[in-house]
Every structure is written in C-alpha cells, then in structure tokens.
Image: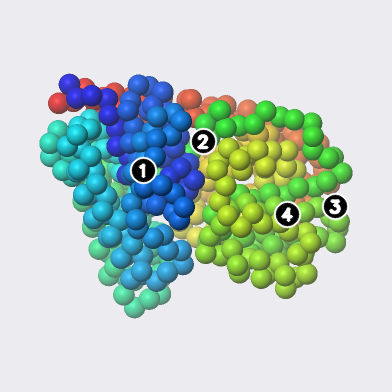
Amino acid sequence: MRPRRLCMVVHAPYPKAETRVEREAHAALEAGWGVDVVALREPGEPATEVTSRGIRIYRLPTARTRGGGASTVLREYVGFTLQATLKVATLHRSRRYAVVQVHNPPDFLVLAGLLPRLTGARLILDIHDLAPEMFEMRFAGRRWSEPATRVLRRIERLALRMADAVVTVHEPYRRLLVQRGVSRDKLTVALNTPEERLIPEKTSTADPAEIRIVYHGTITPHYGLDVLVDGFSAVAAELPEASVEIYGAGDALQSVKDQVARLGLTERFWFSDRFLDNDEVLLRVQGASIGVISNLPIARNQAALPTKLFEYAAMGIPIVSSRLDAIVEYFDETEIAYFDAGDPRSLGQALLETVRDPETASARAGRARERYEGYRWSVSSADYLALLERLLRRR
C-alpha cells in the first residue's frame, strides 16, 4: 500500500486565487494525507514553501497573463503544463504519491499526472470549468475559434478518459459530463462551499445607517461588474447612504473604474485593487447590507455556481443575484432577490427594494442560511474524502 500522499496541480497562484484547491488540500490534510501543491509563482512569492499547516507548495516560474490573446494563453498553458509535468515526475520519485489531482483549466494539464499514473498512482481530474465553453466565451466570432473549440472538446474527452476519477463543482456540471460520456460511477461532486473556519462570527459593529453593497472575486467582463455599476447609478440618488465595495482584481478592473469615474460615482465606490486572502476578504465583507452576484446570461454562467453565493449565505448577508439556471437550482425566490441577468435597471430595482424592505431582506437571508446548512463544506467534502480512500485502496 502506498503512503497517503496527494499531489495537487493547479494553473493558478496558491492559495490566493483558487480557494477550492485550498479547501480540498485542507480536507485531505485533516484526514491524514500528506499534501503537496504545484502552482504558479506570483511576484514576491517563494519558489518553495511549507505552510503552517504542513502543506508543501512548489511554485513554477510561469507568468500569469490576464486579458491576453489566444496565442498568449496557449503559450502560458503549454509552458506551465511542461514545467508541472517535469516537477511532478521529479517529486514522485522521492514522494511516491498515491494520488495526483489535476485542477483544470487547461484539460491537457492532466499530462502532469501521467508518469505517476503509469507507476501506480491514481489520477483525479477536478473540473472547475468546462474548458471548451470558456474558450468559446472568450474568443467566439474569430475565424479560427470553431475548429479550435473542436480540438478542445477532443482534448477534454481524452483527459476525462485518462483520469481514474473526475471531481466537479456542482450537479449541473455533473449532468453535462454524463452527457459527454463520463460514467456516473466515475464522478464525484464537491460543492464550492467555504471552509467553516473561515466564516467570521457575526458581530454588531455594522452601522445600521450605512448601506454597504459588496462584490468580491475576479473582475472580468463575463461577471458583469459593468451591470452592477450601471444598476447602482440608476438608483444612487435614491440611496444616498449606500456605497459599493469591490474586492478583487482582473482584466476588467480598469474599465470598471473608468466607468465609475465617467458616471461621477468615484466617492461611492471603493476598490481593493488586488486579491486578498480568503479569510481576510470574508472578514471585510462581514456585516454587509447586500452581496451582489452580477454574472452575465451567457452559456458558461448559466451553469456556474459562484463560491461567493455560498459565502454570502453562510454569513447571513442578503443576496441580490442574476437569475441563472445553476443558482436557481440551489436557491429559490424566497432565499435570494433575483434580477434579470444583464439588465442594469432590474439590478438597480432589486437593490432598491432590498434596502427599502429590510424585514423581507432579513427573512430571505435567514432562509438562505438555512438552505446553506445542507451544502456546508463538512457535508460536501465527505464524498471527496471517500473518493480519496477508495483510490488509495486500489492497487
């Protein structure tokens, strides 16, 4: 029987950019696994590090590029995959991993686990996003986008076939993967719910006269921050006590800030201008009046279930959200104030009604908090840990 050692591979900085990877790493660690993470290296980060909890991090010198063209993205993905494949192979010689877990995108990053798999390790592919759909969303309309998408679908099929097990983020993705030929027995769902230790205790320090509208996460076009700005602008005069806090970074940050300036709302918006550690951002968001999810109604977002949705629910923050298929599947109208996705007027009206009817907003938040109890990470992670144990028992 191999030692209980797990290697995770992710094309992102760790731990800041991928809280899902951190959650799963901590769950495995607490279950008695030794955990290594191979990730990108951000400026100022050490090449190797052992966290206070004992997770070993190996950071590779691939530059992260946001907003680049297809050739830039491809070079970055291929470069990281080659470096990660070599690194994992080298580590496996001494660490002898029982399981290698590769987090997509890209799907071909699964190659990093090939050599350990050929020498007895088990390979998990963790599907955060459907890579062909992400590519279509970003590069649709280009002359070469259709054949490139077909290639990505073939790569996805091969990667899914190569993996011994597939983990994904929610039921809509699981159903789509079954339609694409993945056996139900091969699939496990681990929801993107927050670790309970990160949820701050409720305090009474919030000023009831202050209306804090918050968003935290990646700032990129398909998350609709421009809709939030326009929606707030439409009702700003009626909510003189309200302000908007935006925590995060991304390729749309500057355009959102420019939009705020054009509308004369600079004094009403605050930006962190950077990603914060998950525990820090949740402490700052705590006590907010409204948490906003403004995702646009594109195909990729219809099947997306944002982590911030569960975080707002866990903290009892009233949620104003785009009406999108996956979100509606997990929370109903009595738990969330929905607006028509992509419509600033509808968003502004939802903000206004939430502020003006605090009793209804509080009741919705309470019901969302109750619903969240069934989605807690301690519940969701149980199937993931059971999968690790099953793979460990296989020779």
Q: Earlier in the sequence, mark 3 or mark 1?
A: 1
* Residue 12 visible within the image: no
Residue 50 is left or right of residue 387, and the answer is: right
Write the residue at 61% across / 40% down. Answer: 280
**Residue assigned mark 1:** 48
Distance between mark 1 and mark 4 Cα atoms? 37 Å
**Disc assigned to residue 266:** none
**Disc assigned to residue 241:** 3
Residue 298 is left or right of residue 175, and the answer is: right
The three-letter code of the residue at mark 1 reads: Thr
Distance between mark 2 and mark 1 Cα atoms? 28 Å
Residue 91 is left or right of residue 228, and the answer is: left
What is the crowding at mark 1: few (fewer than 14 residues within 10 Å), some, or many (at least 20)? some
* Residue 134 image point, x, y percent: 40, 59
* Residue 272 visible within the image: yes
Q: Are marks 3 and 1 in contact (CB under 8 Å)?
A: no
* Residue 75 image point, x, y percent: 30, 65
* Residue 60 image point, x, y percent: 33, 51
